[in-house]
Image (cartoon, rainbow, N blue to C red):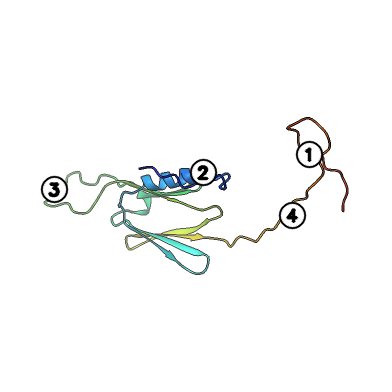
Amino acid sequence: MNTRVFTSPLFLGFDHLEQMLERAAKNSDGYPPYNIEQIGPTGLRITLAVAGFTMDDLQITQEDNQLVIRGRQADDGQGRVFLHRGIAARQFQRAFVMAEGIEVGGAWLDNGLLHIDLARPQPEARVKTIRISKKTTGAVGTAPVVDGSTD
């Protein structure tokens, strides 16, 4: 069932949000597990459980408004005989859709946990007054001409 969220004509220019929601829904694989926590009034931290991965096995990129974490381990099983292999050694890709203005502050690996800090700057309140001008006679569909007065 595909439910469209932004179908109202009151939502102008939100088509890209619909696409982001669709991309996020496709990213439902549970591996690797992760936490997202609030750290301060404007900070977020994503923590992924990446036991067995080294810094060389991990890659973090920001692709437009997505934070993408990829993990790929070198095959070190050559010559080893596993009686049981319960530790995942598979590659992964985990993507997080970020709001406009979110910045990546840094990342570090500690005891099998990959931490990524994000900063969410507080937007400045913006109020803009739009001047209403008289339309001069002209062709239909042309932009109105501003009368030039400064009242």
Dot 1 or dot 3, earlier in sequence: 3
Q: Quadrant of residue 144?
A: top right
Q: Which residue is depicted at the point 48% across and 58% down?
A: 106
Question: Dots 1 and 4: beta carbons under 8 Å?
Answer: no
Question: Dots 1 and 3: beta carbons under 8 Å?
Answer: no
> Disc 2 vs disc 4: which is toward the camera?
4
Dot 2 falls on a residue whose secondary structure is helix
Name the residue tied to disc 4. 129
Dot 2 or dot 4, earlier in sequence: 2
Dot 1 falls on a residue whose secondary structure is loop
Q: Which residue is depicted at the point 28% across and 55% down?
A: 52
State the separation of the CA atoms marked 2 and 4: 27 Å
Q: Which residue is depicted at the point 64% across and 61% down?
A: 124
Q: Which residue is depicted at the point 69% across and 58% down?
A: 127
State the separation of the CA atoms marked 3 and 4: 72 Å
Looking at the picture, which amino acid does disc 1 mark? Pro
Dot 1 or dot 2, earlier in sequence: 2
Looking at the picture, which amino acid does disc 2 mark? His
Name the residue tied to disc 3. 81
Tell whether 81 sits left or right of 96.
Answer: left
At label 3, counting other C-alpha atoms closer than 10 Å, the crowd grade (few under 14, some 14-19, many 20 or more) is: few
Label ID, residue 144: 1
At label 4, counting other C-alpha atoms closer than 10 Å, the crowd grade (few under 14, some 14-19, many 20 or more) is: few
State the separation of the CA atoms marked 2 and 3: 49 Å
> Disc 1 vs disc 3: which is toward the camera?
1
Give coordinates of residue 136: x percent, y percent: 83, 37
Give coordinates of residue 114: x percent, y percent: 38, 58
> Disc 3 vs disc 4: which is toward the camera?
4
Label ID, residue 90: none
Looking at the picture, which amino acid does disc 4 mark? Thr
